[in-house]
Amino acid sequence: MTPNKPVHFPLSAFPVVNNCLEVGGQPLTRLACRVGKTPFFAYDRALLTKRVRHLRENLPDGIHLHYAMKANPMPAVVQHMASLVDGLDVASSGEMQVALDTNTTPENISFAGPGKTESELSSAIAAGIVINLESEREMECASRIGLSLGYRPRVAVRVNPDFELKSSGMKMGGGPKQFGIDAERVPEILKRMAQLPLDFMGFHIFSGSQNLKAESIIEAQEKTIGLAIRLAQDAPSPVKLLNIGGGFGIPYFPGEEPLNISTIGERLADQLPKVKKALPEAQVVIELGRYLVGEAGIYVCRVIDRKISRGQVFLVTDGGLHHHLAASGNFGQVIRKNYPVAIGNRMHAEELETVSVVGPLCTPLDVLADKMEMAKGNVGDLVVVFQSGAYGKTASPAAFLSHPDAAEVLA
């Protein structure tokens, strides 16, 4: 490669055998035959298991690990993750139904998200899951529904903290936000809750996502714990659940390095005695989505045409932004950067070229790789977009231009 040219962090999770990427212990070409069509998303169950094991080894004992299903709600993935983690967090009634189909007990499922409808709240209360209240309306509504159903709703207060997760890719707390209840207003909410037939469980405090700086996450965790201890003074009953969020990121772009989990674990271990002393009944939860599944998935599409336009090579594929909006740069990026992309059946080819990988949609936005150096690709080859296990298919406009949907497989 060209000297000093920015390159992605080396991706070694998926092995390469005979010049072909392997997923789930089998060659990509064989997996494509098994799926029966392209494009498709493939998730490696062994890598999912390995990631959870890595967290267990580095986070302190006593931390409960929850999977945030919004990152990847594929039922097979959720079933596998449910067998590995301590709980599931959902963000819609659709995700809730998938979660309830697993062996996870309802008290270890929580429901977050602004604007929950009465129907969603009713379903959640009847199921017995924990509702993360995002507003006074939700609190009053949950109380009313609980009375009508004869069930005492389990609730936690989602807090919009008075601080942000520094250097996060997406800020979910601090300042004016549609998420949760502003920290300064939580005491009055708790006093009102004491008058209602609600089973107060604790707090959900989530300040940001996609963060690769251990020190930023450590600082946010310390502030979160301090805030929870202060708010607990006005709670109607002891705190049994303290969800401190997550925010753990994965590397996507040149110059990014993996998050140092061991440092986070060491510092969090120092905080737990403080939690135990102030909130002796509290179960401390870390809620992760992208970090658990993002690096275990790939998106695969097939080259259907090879074109040269005024000296620039284009590989036109049968996949694109309608399946993988994030990889096209149109989901959260201000300045477009390439995801790691390769020709999956030519991983170690000697002949390299600079190409743009585009999809079949009639828009210049349909770009999966812009002027990237990779193996020379031909019609029929399989293009792989790495780091695609989170916010891929379900975060994309699948109906745009009415092209066929992408398949999914857990290998």
Image: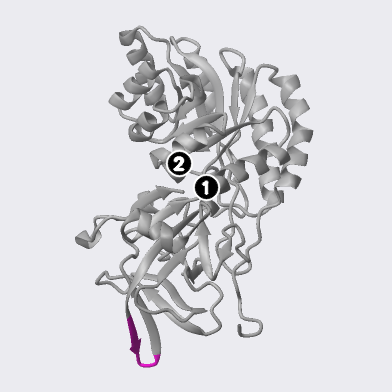
Q: Is residue 138 magenta?
A: no
Residue 162, horizontal then vertical, whole percent: 59, 39
Disc marking residue 77: 2
Residue 98, horizontal then vertical, whole percent: 38, 32
Which residue reaches farthest bottom? 310
Contact, mark 1 vs mark 2 (Cβ under 8 Å): yes
| Mark 1 residue crowding within 10 angstroms, few (<14) / some (14–19) / many (20+) | many
Q: Residue at x 46, y 49 (%)?
A: 411
Relative to 163, is 289 on the left or the right? left
Q: Which residues are magenta?
A: 306-311
Whether residue 325 is visible here, answered yes or no, is no
Relative to 378, is 81 on the left or the right? right
Location of residue 216 with respect to 323 vertically, above or below: above
Q: Nearer the viewer, residue 47 or 140?
A: 47
Q: Main secondary structure of the magenta part?
A: strand
Q: Quadrant of residue 323?
A: bottom left
Q: Is residue 310 magenta?
A: yes
Sequence-first tag of 1 and 2: 2
Q: Which residue is mark 1?
A: 293
Q: Secondary structure at mark 1?
A: helix
Amino acid type of disc 1? Val
